[in-house]
Every structure is written in structure tokens, then in C-alpha cells.
Image (cartoon, helix red, strand yellow):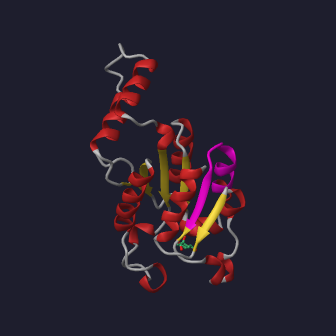
């Protein structure tokens, strides 16, 4: 099932894991059993990095390609999946045009015990005190990413509410910004 607005290709195993953990029709399995099921499959939620994308990033590939490049978000996520595999990480890649979804997903990442969050909040980066509060409100490392370099663009893009709360920021490298962020996440 494609959960949320944009939920990129998870392979079979994580889907199964989510089904197991969330499945109320198996009450005979207690928390320890679920954890054991995770361990048997060789991963844990602490290997999972959430990659959250905000408004208009669903338009990548057609949206101002001279600034954001020709790759679609799906293509960027595909490259990132390969990198994640090499680093022994699981990805949870999502996109929404709605601020509240990004906040809910950050809370979810914390509740699920994810390893880190990579966040490209799009224009909400420059306006959202709610995202600032959400990042401050969770204990997970949050890495701000941008395809373009907002500091080399219009002055209204120079302020970043995300950056003021994030663990660190990577911008200006196109899709490589995401890969560098993933490398950083792997070392946190
Ligand atoms: C962006 C930069 C933001 O200023 C802009 O609003 C975006 C994309 C980037 O990835 O370069 O939507 O986050």
C-alpha cells in the first residue's frame, strides 16, 4: 500500500515488519516477540532514516530544472536507496505539500525510534516556526538538506527555521545533498 501522500518503494521486508508491529489481530505476540521478529530479519528501526520532503518537491524534474535539476524525487529516492543499502540503512522516504504531515512524520520517526531524519522542507524552511518547534521537540538528529543553495539565492531564502533547529545542513549539491546527508546520518 502507498501510505501517506508519497511513500517510496520499500522492499517486502519492511512492509512485513510494519504489518507485524501494527497488526492488532495477533495479540498473542507480545512486544518482545515483535522485537525478536525484527532481529531475525536482521534490522531494527534504529537503522531507519526518514527522508521527508515538503511542498512542491513532488514536482522535481519539471519544476524550474535550471535550479533544481532534471531528476524526479522518485529518481533521487532510487539513488538514495542504493546508497542506504551500502550503508546498512533502511529508508522511509515521503513527500507532502502539507506542513502538518511533516510534523506528524517527525513525531512518528521519534516514536518509532528511527536513527535520524533528513528533511528538505522546501519553502516551509524559511517560514515555519512549527517545523522549528517540531525539530526542537524530538531527540532525533535532523539533517536539513536542499538541492539548491538558498544562501546564494533571494534574501527571503536566507533565513532557515529548519536550520536553526537542525543538527546540521547540507545544500547546493543537487541530489548529492541527500546522499551526503545520508552519509552523515550513518555516522551519527
Ligand atoms: C529547496 C530550496 C527552497 O528555498 C525552495 O523553496 C524549495 C526547494 C531546495 O531543495 O533547494 O522548494 O528546499
- Residue 23, percent from left and from top: 34, 26
Q: Quadrant of the N terminus?
A: top left
Residue appearing at x 48%, y 64% in the figure: 179
User: Is 36 drawn above or below residue 154 in the view shown?
Assistant: above
Q: Is residue 139 left or right of residue 8?
A: right
Q: Classify residue 110 by image quadrant.
A: top right
Residue appearing at x 37%, y 74% in the figure: 71
Residue at the front extreme, as displayed: 86
- Residue 78, percent from left and from top: 34, 62
Magenta stretch contains residue 137 = yes
Of residue 150 and residue 131, the one placed in the foreground of this image is 150
- Residue 151, percent from left and from top: 66, 79
Magenta stretch contains residue 18 = no
User: Is 156 drawn above or below residue 169 in the view shown?
Assistant: below
Q: Is residue 151 left or right of residue 88?
A: right
User: Is 175 drawn above or below residue 29 in the view shown?
Assistant: below
Number of marks present in the image shown: 0
**Quadrant location of ligand 1?**
bottom right
Of residue 161 and residue 11, the one placed in the foreground of this image is 11
User: Which region is colored magenta?
Assistant: 131-145
Residue at the top extreme, as displayed: 28
Residue appearing at x 54%, y 61% in the figure: 181
Q: Classify residue 167 by image quadrant.
A: bottom right
- Residue 173, percent from left and from top: 53, 75
Residue appearing at x 70%, y 71% in the figure: 159
Amino acid at each position: 500500500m502507498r501510505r501517506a501522500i508519497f511513500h517510496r518503494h520499500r522492499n517486502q521486508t519492511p512492509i512485513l515488519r510494519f504489518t507485524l508491529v501494527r497488526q492488532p489481530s495477533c495479540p498473542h505476540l507480545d512486544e518482545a516477540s515483535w522485537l525478536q521478529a525484527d532481529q531475525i530479519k536482521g534490522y531494527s528501526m534504529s537503522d531507519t532514516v526518514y527522508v521527508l520532503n515538503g511542498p512542491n518537491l513532488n514536482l522535481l524534474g519539471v519544476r524550474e530544472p535550471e535550479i533544481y535539476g532534471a531528476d524526479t524525487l522518485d529518481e533521487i529516492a532510487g539513488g538514495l536507496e542504493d546508497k542506504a543499502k551500502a550503508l546498512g540503512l533502511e529508508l522511509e522516504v515521503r513527500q507532502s505539500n502539507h506542513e502538518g504531515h511533516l510534523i506528524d512524520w517527525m513525531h512518528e520517526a521519534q516514536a518509532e525510534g528511527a536513527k535520524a531524519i533528513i528533511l528538505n522542507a522546501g519553502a516551509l524552511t524559511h517560514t515555519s516556526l512549527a517545523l522549528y518547534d517540531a525539530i526542537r521537540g524530538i531527540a532525533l538528529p535532523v539533517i536539513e538538506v536542499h538541492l539548491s543553495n538558498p544562501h546564494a539565492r533571494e534574501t527571503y531564502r536566507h533565513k532557515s527555521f529548519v536550520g536553526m533547529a537542525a543538527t546540521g545542513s547540507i545544500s547546493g549539491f543537487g541530489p548529492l545533498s541527500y546522499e551526503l546527508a545520508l552519509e552523515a546520518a550513518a555516522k551519527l
